[in-house]
Image: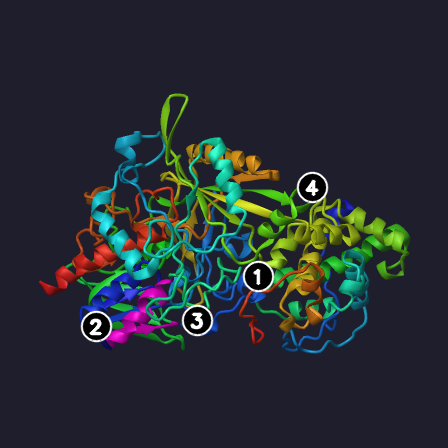
Amino acid sequence: MNRRDFLFSSVLLLSTNFFTLEASVYTQKIAILKEPYQTFLTLQDDLFPPTSHLSQINKIGFLKAVMSDSYIPKSEKQFIINGLKWLNDSSKEEYSKNYINLSKYQREHILREISQYRWGENFIYTILNYILEATFSDPIYNANINESGWKWVAHVSGLPRPTRVMI
Amino acid sequence: MREFDVCIVGSGAGGSPIAYELSRAGFSVVVLEKGNYLNENDFNKDELSVSRRSIYLPSQNDEYHMVNDGESIQKTSADGWNFWNGNIVGGSSNLMSGYFHKMRESDFKLKSKYGSIEGANIVDWPISLKELEPYYKKVVDVVGVSGEGMELNALAENGSTAWFDRACKKLNYTSVITPRAILSSAREGRSSCYYSNFCGSYGCSSGAKGSSRASLLNVALKTNKLTILANSFVYKLDSNSSGKVTLAHYYDKANKSQTIKAKIFVVSAQAHESVRLLLNSKGKYAPNGLGNENNQVGRNLIFSAGGSGEGRFELDNLSKSEQIALMQRGAFFNRSLTQWHEYKDNGTLYKGGVIDFLFEHANPIAKSMRSLYDDRGNISWGVALQKRIHDSFTKSKILTYEVFNDWLPTDKCYVDVDQSNKDKWGVNVGRINLNAHEHDLRVGNFLAQKSENVLKEMGAVDISRSISSSPPANLIAGGCRFGNEAKNSVLDRNCKVHDMQNLYVVDASFMPTGGSVPFTWTIYANSFRVADEILRNLRS
């Protein structure tokens, strides 16, 4: 079994307190937790840097809400959890350190490496999907703070906008 | 048990004209709709809930279809397909873009005019354009269609349409202003279009879009003869020895089974779901399901063939005034090419189709997602991705086109009921068996080439196309085709089930061929025609 097959066949469940499990909505405050929260915190900025225009985007809060969103399939949530674990596995295999303990150059190298695998490409795509949802969703979902994502690209919202969280 | 003159299953473009006409004629009508009853005040332009989380569709965990793509059979919840379309009162007509093209005479005579094609079950329609024409007009009068030569003026246009018109003139093509089921001026309690820039996929907050809810049901409710029961899923129809449907069984919002009695039953639940209901309505007098004595129910499922393509206009290549025109928000592009409805290629006459041009949807999340892959096809991230996204919003604009041509019916494209998979109510789910005829791709690519010629002449770059045999899940028809003979059709020419006295099917499932246009205008028109037939029956 090669490494890629191993990663695919592994059922690597993380600690269930990664994200708080009580019913959550997009407006709920985030509980700051330990690993692998820190892994995501580093990864989100590597994939979509918090430049001055985008520093307010609440990516981690949005992802936490996604993990409690009943519209998102359980398999997708599990893939996110597994992917973060596999990202650390790859980092340790290459550099004997977790992802967050790598230099910026090393993290970029790991991302390049995993993107060559189907799981890695899918994982990066999935995380970016939710980062972009956070960046461009209506501010009512508590991620696109002060419409900073919309302002960054001069997007003008359609009207009427939602007056309450719809999901 | 409640009793009505007419019981209609489904509140979309098929069922609503029947409800409108019969309630206004004084008959008691009930419409059973699986989804919620939402109105103008309930709609907004929230991409996350409407487009990303699909709040107007059922959960795929609770309700799904099985899909057989020829290689495997999987649940839609697992394979990415979604064949639900607008589970709300008014159905998918709430969410349509309202591109309204009529079928032409040749569409009714596909077999006799263009001949047989091996592997395709092409037939002529049992009615002619002449019979449907008055009802197309009725849709214009009642639902409202804006455009050239219509009572309602064309909608406001983006300034760049002039480039399109110039390009067509140079190419000797005919530019057509696209008819739209959107009010350009207020009428009968509905406001005019307010050019939100977010039309397709969204409910309309002004009532301008000609959904069956806004244009028909809300009007019919004023008669006090119409009852709309939302959150009511009809799962079985009972029939008797006289060939009559006697009862509709449905689950209400509390998941409690209820029944309704009526003189006439009309099924209009979208093509594949109407098939499912007929096949799930087995009984002593319908051992194979309703109308299925000749095993025709579910056969000859069709979609709209074709696909889409696009070209990009870069602001750096335009003058300041051209940039302002192009980046204007809200006003529609509204241009179509219809001259290749039929065409000759290497001396052979082909049935072609129509092409609609429209701007890329303004949804920002979807738009940003398009930048994820770089020019070499690799996924990108970081500053490079951010630059690609920023440029796509601020330095260019994409004009897209959609090709509509006939999806030829084949033996391998059909709906049946999966005997081992059930929805949340324990009702067997529908199984959609997919197959496309290679002829569809040939025609689609011919039309795409014409579209690309225009884009090129307009100065677009990065021109691309996606013409494929992948079915558009929002353009489903067939499965209960109408015809003159029971041995090869389900419905008679008036969309009444052969050999049954009081059961009609009026969504797009009646269509033996699709007409190479979006179906909605034809569904509306045909239902108004059937409504007249039901009225005659009820009065006699």
Q: On the image, numbered disc 1 is attached to which residue?
A: B52
Residue type, mark 2 in image? Ser
Pointer 3 with pointer 2, Cβ within 8 A? no
Outermost left residue: B540
A126 sits left or right of B335 in the view: right
Q: Disc 4 and disc 3: Cα gap in Å?
A: 42 Å
Residue B445 screen position, x and y as percent: 49, 34
Label 1: state its secondary structure: helix
Residue in front for this viewpoint, A2 or B62: B62
Q: On the image, numbered disc 3 is attached to which residue?
A: B40
Q: On the image, numbered disc 4 is attached to which residue?
A: B377
Q: Disc 4 and disc 2: Cα gap in Å?
A: 59 Å
Residue type, mark 4 in image? Gly
**Camera-side mark, 3 or 2:** 3
Q: Is residue B458 magenta?
A: no
Name the subunit of mark 3: B
**Camera-side mark, 1 or 3:** 3
Residue located at (88% from left, 52% from top):
A106
Sequence-first disc among 4 and 2: 2
Q: Which residues are magenta?
A: B211-231
